[in-house]
Image (cartoon, rainbow, N blue to C red):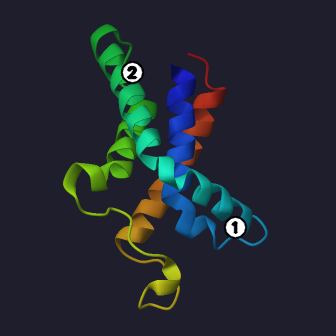
Amino acid sequence: MALLLDLANILGGLLLAVPLLRSLPKVGDPLGRFTDRIAPWAWLVGILALVAGGYYLIVHLVSGPRLFHFEVVGIAVGVILLWDRLTGRRALTGSPSSSPSGGVLSGRALLLAVFGVIAIIVGLQGLVTPN
């Protein structure tokens, strides 16, 4: 179950950080193509992140030892990826090239992209952290 939470954090982070990651030289285009392939299943990654994060939230609140950042980030990733299905409004808006600031991320898109990078790091940390 911990592996599912870590994978959901990594995949969800990739989906959220794709506008920022596309601007990286040499690795941006392959990462962009990969996230374009998994983008139709973003809702499934969101459900997985919510379920796994919620499970560990309940387990750690009831039996201890304490609340960890892995499940908090997982729940946040799940809510952000499911935002359009929950509210009917899109959380992720347009690409940076279509922004009025000339290809530079700003506002909510930048915040979501930075949170996506954080989710990737947390997911990778979860892979190497023993339970």
Residue carrying label 2 = 56
Give residue 71's quadrant in the image: top left
The amino acid sitting under disc 2 is: Tyr
Q: Secondary structure at mark 1?
A: helix
Residue 13 on image: x %, y %: 52, 50
Residue lying at the far top in this picture: please name it.
Answer: 63
Seen in the image, is 66 located left or right of residue 35? left
124 shown above or below 120: above
Point 57% across, 35% down: residue: 7
Residue 104 at least partly seen: no
Q: Measuring 66% from the left and 28% from the top, which residue is drawn there?
A: 128
Labels 1 & 2 near each other (Cβ < 8 A): no
Q: Is residue 107 above or below residue 65?
A: below
Q: Residues within 10 Å of mark 2 (few under 14, many from 20)?
A: many
Q: Earlier in the sequence, mark 1 or mark 2?
A: 1
Observer-nearest of 57 and 85: 85
| Spatial separation of the CA atoms under disc 1 and disc 2 | 33 Å
Which quadrant of the view contains residue 25? bottom right
Position of 30 compared to 42: left or right? Answer: right
Where residue 97 sits in the image (x, y, percent)? Answer: 52, 84
Locate residue 30: give its quadrant: bottom right
Please identify the quadrant where the C terminus is shown: top right
Res 96 visible? yes
What is the crowding at mark 1: few (fewer than 14 residues within 10 Å), some, or many (at least 20)? some
> Camera-side residue: 34 or 119?
34
Q: Which residue carries the number 1 mark?
A: 28
Q: In the image, what residue occupies the spot 37% across and 28% down?
A: 51
**Type of amino acid under label 1:** Gly
Q: Secondary structure at mark 2?
A: helix
> Looking at the image, is mark 1 or mark 2 nearer the viewer?
1
Q: In the displayed structure, does residue 58 sit left or right of residue 77? A: left
Image x and y of residue 102, in percent: 50, 91
